[in-house]
Image: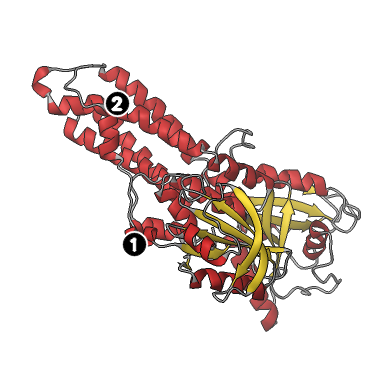
Amino acid sequence: MDRRLKNPEVIAEKELRPWYSFPCMRKDTIAAIATPPGTGAISVIRVSGETALEIAEAVFSRSTKHFKTHTAHYGNILTKDHIPIDNVLLLIMRSPRSYTGEDSIEISCHGGLLVTRRVLERVLEAGARPAQPGEFSLRAYLNGKLDLAQAEAIQELITAKNTLALENAEKQLEGALSKTIRGFQKQLIDIAAILEAWVDFPEEGLEFASKEELVKRLESVLFSMAHLRDTFHDGKSLHTGLSLCLLGAPNVGKSSLMNALLGKDRAIVTEIAGTTRDVLEEDLHLGSFHFKLMDTAGIRDTQETIEKEGIRRSEKAMQEADLILLILDTTRAPEQELIQRAPPEKTVIVWNKIDLAQPQIDIPSVKISAKEKIGLDLLKKAIEQKIWKHGIPAKDEILITQQRHFHALSSAVASCQAVLHGLQSEGSPEFVTSDMRACLNELGTIIGTNVTEDILSAIFSKFCLGK
């Protein structure tokens, strides 16, 4: 390649410059309780910053100056007057071999609100300040210990509601998503270098690849980026959980099905129509998913004021739910109006009470008996098939779960399509290179190579204290 052509490494540094800020915050030594509040066997106080080791020396009953990194030591936390507060284990982690990349200590004391608070207060008295939510992870990001996508994976790991969500968060924390994004960047930067050369040296007719070859390479990257973007539906379902609404006329067995799925008597079941007057909610783990299960009031024409309000809420739940189980009674004619109103793309039709009669089926449906617990496995399979719109993901597939990542990838795809259109229509090279920069910029926001303080604050403020 001609030496006058911009080096891809230079373009990468220019276009994808890391954002570092918070200089005053990074000089402080911070401390927080890293374990949940309440009574337990132990509590952990985490300390990180320039004076973390000095604080350890000040509060611990033994001299810590010569403690080797990643060693644990038994002793006491002492007041300024050398009165023991608690006997603890002190873990020393010297920079850069720590979570944050800074000098850090962790104090494992006895669990309990009072003793934990007293140990933390002693650490703050010795020179630390209280950490902000997510500040330890923010420092790890700013110090290059992990990128932004990996930092977000930590919070997803903590809040995972099912095994698939946990596995996906673990892959993201290990760098699977970041590696994929950097792969996109590398391919696009190679193309960008050629496009930049065309702009800078138009009179020299430099051509290191034909336009047909560049179009083919762009199409390949574009396809991969669009595929990753399209995993968001499944990824979001795993990460946030889904709302599952039980819908139907009175006395079709909605409450009985709720109890059968939960394995406990949560909803009142009677033969009196209109027993359920409000939307009942309960958490439900079903296969790979976590649901907010909602039992709704039976939908029918009524003049009773309270029941009318319950029906209004049922109709609202139908519109807002991610998935609907429309329950029909095999002993009655199907409610055709209700079938037509339920959105087909998110509705599973369920015939209940097959222990009493067999339905006349002319629509795709599942047959069950909630009372006798017949057909529940078939219902669970039907629910999974409805959720996985693109089929069950492969075990090694990466799913994006963050709205932020989805928007960034959507913008990157749009910019890449503009680059492709520009090449195919002989567009101005200046516009083509501008679109390419926009594409690279959007990809960079995912892993944090060019993000604003507002984005960082929004991300890390959602973290718990001590993380």
Residue 210 x/y as whole percent:
26, 16
Residue type (three-letter) at the residue carrying disc 2 = Ile
Residue 78 placement, left or right of 421: right
Viewer-nearest of discs 2 and 1: 1
Q: Quadrant of residue 170?
A: top right
Task: Say which residue appears at 11% left-offset and 23% top-offset.
Answer: 202
Q: In which quarter of the image is the C terminus?
A: bottom right
Alpha-carbon neighbours of circle 2 within 10 Å: few (<14), some, or many (≥20)?
many
Mark 2 or mark 1: whose residue is earlier in sequence:
1
Q: Return the residue at label 2.
A: 191
Task: Say which residue appears at 67% left-offset and 69% top-offset.
Answer: 86
- Where 444 falls versus 11 (above or below)? below
Residue type (three-letter) at the residue carrying disc 1 = Cys
* Relative depth, front residue between 328 and 246: 246
Alpha-carbon neighbours of circle 1 within 10 Å: few (<14), some, or many (≥20)?
few
Q: Return the residue at label 1.
A: 24
Find numbered disc 2 in the image and state the secondary structure of the residue it sits on. Answer: helix
Find numbered disc 1 in the image and state the secondary structure of the residue it sits on. Answer: helix
- Where 200 falls versus 345 (above or below)? above
Residue 312 placement, left or right of 462: right
Please identify the residue farthest to the left as the structure is shown: 203
Task: Say which residue appears at 37% left-offset and 38% top-offset.
Answer: 413
Residue 431 placement, left or right of 71: left
* Relative depth, front residue between 372 and 420: 420
- Where 212 falls versus 122 (above or below)? above
Q: Quadrant of residue 397?
A: top right
Residue 448 x/y as whole percent:
39, 46
**Spatial distance from mark 2 to mark 1, Cα to Cα?**
39 Å
